[in-house]
Image (tube, coloured by chain):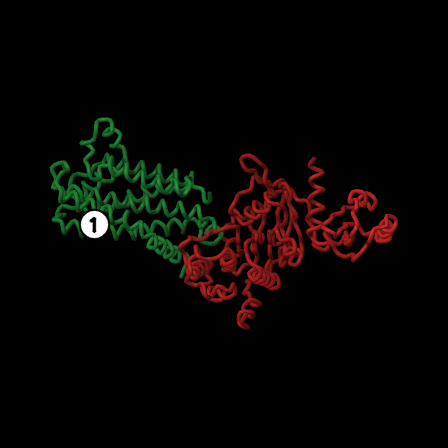
Chain colours: A red, B green
């Protein structure tokens, strides 16, 4: 990457107005019904100005629907949403001029050219000069004349991100920005999003990439079956539990181990993972159990769990409640 | 460039790229005009065949740009998510619709010019033409057919919409007094055809072009269609599939 590109990315030209509101985004008791199902049921959460909020959950959990209501392209059945203090329906155009939206798939005429679409969107936001910088920032300078139809999945996502940035957003909604994107493209998108956050833009990021969420987010909102099963800072979410991993060559009765240690246990080949609450005697009890059973105990380590582990734990807990 | 002009430019670029639309917008009207003015087989109600054909073909041109071309393009924009994405910008519905209408008017001016030129070359002499009537007829026809086109585009799947617009175009071409006077149709079809918007438009244009008395009847029929079609477009239009 050239030096000038680096500079462009760090200068991501965010339009900051001093927002006095406590929340950049506030969702209260949101309900969205489709003809045959309740897609979002009584969801409430907030995003602080300048923070990165990861919206995670399985497919069909209500993430996209919530993002659509917040960005004004879908109406809520009930509840209220406030974006930068504005109502997404009533104050739509006013809100649109201050936010960026990158929804899933498409949104561009297949025969439209990269440079032309980007210039058009910059014109729509009254930021005509911005197109030149944006096309370089997303590394599509050499594709200016290519049609949308010809772009790879990753290139389409990068152009979509650039279109969302045409706004000089104070707040940006990103729905799965890295899906279908190769490693280099992912790094690029993450870097841009990281810089956006650094420069004070509020980021609402829906993603299936839990590593990505863990690396970037300050706050996590977790959906399942249209409800929130977690809504807290990343630190709080991960902090209460520790993960212990170990390797063994023995056949272990996972159920017995889980029962003995009173925690969730996962096995992946020779690796075993235990999700424990902060308990000082945990390691001692664990090694005693292994010694008593004459099992080999290798590579024992303990640390902050991955978001993925917490996610699995919370999802299976919510499934148990559903039953 | 301001948002409206940028959108208008985009509309025109997209239309220019859809080359197959050129056949519909220019090819078919001109072909019909040339063919039937040279092969004199049409009953033309006492007018010369060219004097009968020019206004009918003008009506057809309005139908092709305001209904078919606009409707098909909008249907695909809806299915590609273009409209949805535009909905997240400060453009707004009003400016979007205004840009589409303006783009359609540009095309109609081109069509009008071309058809007039071809008509003149084929011996048409519009001595008695009543231009205000022609302008009103084209304006009202544009509103009416745009309403019909957008009603279909706002609800049907893009491919179904494509077929529906073309099918409707063909039906209105045959039954709508464009090249064939409605009096030549079978009784059942005639009583139905007299209420069609294309009949009303071609009769208005025929009156205007040939300096005949203004058909108030046709004006009322076209106005009612215009209001109904626009109300339907507003009521039924969905921005995304």
Left or right of A256 in this view: B212: left
| Residue A50 at x, y percent in the picture | 62, 59
Work out whether residue A140 or residue B140 is closer to the camera in this orientation and state it.
A140
| Residue B227 at x, y percent in the picture | 34, 38
| Residue A10 at x, y percent in the picture | 58, 67
Residue at the far bottom: name it: A3
Looking at the rendering, which quadrant does residue B62 occupy? top left
The vertical placement of A26 against B165, above or below, is below
The vertical placement of A216 against B207, above or below, is below
Can the viewer see residue B139 in this picture? Answer: yes
> Which residue has dot 1 on it?
B115
Q: Secondary structure at mark 1?
A: helix
Work out whether residue A300 or residue B220 is closer to the camera in this orientation and state it.
A300
The answer for which chain carries disc 1 is B
Can the viewer see residue A97 in this picture? Answer: no
| Residue A130 at x, y percent in the picture | 48, 65
Work out whether residue B62 or residue A274 is closer to the camera in this orientation and state it.
A274
The N terminus of chain A sits in image quarter: bottom right
Which residue occupies 40% across, 61% down?
B1
Left or right of A199 in this view: B87: left
Q: How many marks?
A: 1
Looking at the rendering, which quadrant does residue B183 occupy? top left
Categorize mark 1 by other alpha carbons within 10 Å: few (<14), some (14-19), many (20+). many
């Amino acid at each position: 990457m050239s030096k000038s590109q680096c500079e462009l990315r760090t200068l991501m030209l965010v339009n900051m107005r001093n927002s006095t509101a406590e929340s950049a985004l506030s969702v209260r008791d949101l309900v969205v019904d489709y003809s045959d199902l309740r897609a979002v049921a009584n969801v409430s959460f907030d995003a602080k100005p300048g923070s990165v909020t990861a919206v995670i959950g399985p497919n069909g959990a209500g993430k996209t629907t919530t993002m659509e209501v917040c960005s004004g392209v879908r109406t809520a059945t009930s509840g209220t949403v406030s974006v930068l203090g504005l109502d997404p329906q009533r104050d739509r155009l006013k809100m649109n001029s201050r936010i960026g939206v990158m929804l899933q798939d498409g949104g561009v005429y297949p025969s439209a050219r990269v440079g032309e679409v980007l210039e058009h969107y910059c014109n729509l936001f009254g930021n005509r000069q911005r197109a030149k910088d944006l096309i370089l920032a997303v590394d599509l300078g050499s594709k200016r004349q290519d049609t949308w139809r010809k772009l790879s999945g990753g290139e389409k996502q990068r152009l979509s991100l650039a279109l969302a940035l045409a706004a000089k957003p104070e707040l940006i909604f990103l729905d799965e920005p890295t899906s279908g994107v190769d490693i280099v493209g992912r790094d690029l998108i993450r870097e841009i999003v990281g810089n956006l956050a650094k420069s004070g833009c509020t980021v609402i990021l829906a993603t299936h990439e839990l590593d990505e969420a863990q690396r970037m987010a300050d706050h996590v909102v977790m959906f399942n079956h249209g409800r929130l099963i977690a809504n807290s800072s990343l630190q709080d979410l991960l902090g209460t539990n520790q993960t212990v991993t170990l390797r063994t060559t023995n056949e272990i009765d996972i159920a017995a181990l889980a029962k003995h240690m009173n925690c969730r246990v996962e096995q992946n080949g020779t690796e075993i993972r235990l999700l424990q609450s902060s308990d000082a005697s945990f390691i001692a009890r664990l090694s005693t159990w292994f010694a008593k059973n004459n099992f080999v105990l290798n590579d024992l380590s303990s640390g902050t769990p991955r978001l993925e582990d917490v996610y699995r734990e919370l999802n299976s807990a919510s499934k148990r409640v559903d039953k | 460039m301001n948002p409206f002009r940028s959108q208008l430019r985009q509309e025109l670029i997209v239309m220019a790229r859809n080359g197959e639309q050129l056949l519909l917008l220019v090819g078919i009207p001109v072909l019909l005009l040339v063919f039937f003015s040279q092969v004199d087989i049409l009953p033309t109600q006492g007018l010369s065949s060219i004097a009968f054909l020019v206004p009918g073909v003008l009506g057809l041109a309005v139908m092709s740009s305001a209904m078919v071309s606009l409707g098909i393009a909008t249907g695909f924009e809806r299915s590609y998510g273009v409209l949805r994405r535009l909905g997240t910008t400060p453009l707004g519905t009003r400016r979007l619709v205004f840009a589409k209408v303006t783009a359609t008017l540009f095309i109609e001016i081109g069509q009008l010019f071309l058809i007039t030129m071809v008509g003149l070359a084929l011996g048409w002499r519009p001595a008695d033409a009543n231009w205000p009537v022609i302008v009103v007829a084209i304006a009202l026809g544009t509103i009416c057919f745009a309403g019909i086109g957008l009603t279909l585009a706002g609800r049907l799947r893009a491919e179904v919409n494509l077929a529906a617009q073309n099918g409707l175009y063909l039906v209105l071409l045959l039954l709508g007094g464009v090249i064939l006077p409605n009096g030549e149709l079978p009784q059942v079809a005639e009583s139905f055809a007299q209420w069609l918007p294309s009949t009303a438009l071609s009769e208005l244009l025929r009156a205007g072009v040939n300096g005949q008395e203004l058909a108030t009847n046709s004006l009322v029929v076209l106005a009612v269609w215009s209001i109904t079609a626009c109300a339907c477009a507003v009521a039924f239009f969905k921005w995304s599939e």
